[in-house]
Amino acid sequence: MGHSASHGCIRLANWDVVRLATKIKRGEAVSIH
């Protein structure tokens, strides 16, 4: 982390994934800016 290293994939820390997962419902569209 800290530099561009993906090809369009989203890189998140584990705690960010957990937080995001608690805020959305299964099947819900997500747009990250």
Image: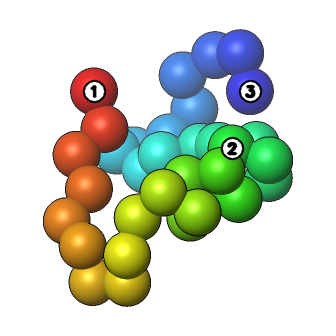
Labels in figure, total: 3
Mark 1 to mark 3 CA distance (whole Å) = 17 Å
Classify mark 1: residues with Cα within 10 Å, few (<14), some (14-19) or many (20+): few
Q: Quadrant of the N terminus?
A: top right
Judged from the image, the secondary structure of the residue bearing numbered disc 1 is loop
**Which is more N-terminal, label 3 or label 1?**
3
Left or right of residue 7: residue 28: left
Q: Residue at position x 43%, y 50% from top?
A: 9
Q: Residue at position x 48%, y 46% from top?
A: 10
What residue sits right under mark 1 in the picture? 33
**The one of 6 and 15 positioned closer to us in this rendering:** 15
Q: Residue at position x 24%, y 73% from top?
A: 28
Under mark 1, the amino acid is His
Is the residue under label 2 in contact with that under label 3 (CB below 8 Å)? no
Q: In which quarter of the image is the C terminus?
A: top left
Q: Where is residue 23 in the image (x, y as percent from the top left)?
A: 48, 57
Left or right of residue 19: residue 13: right
Colour mapping = rainbow
Left or right of residue 7: residue 5: right
What residue sits right under mark 2 in the picture? 16
**Residue 1, numbered label:** 3
Under mark 2, the amino acid is Asp
Q: Position of residue 20 (x, y in %)?
A: 55, 53
Q: Which of marks 3 and 2 is in front?
A: 2
Is the residue under label 3 in contact with that under label 1 (CB below 8 Å)? no
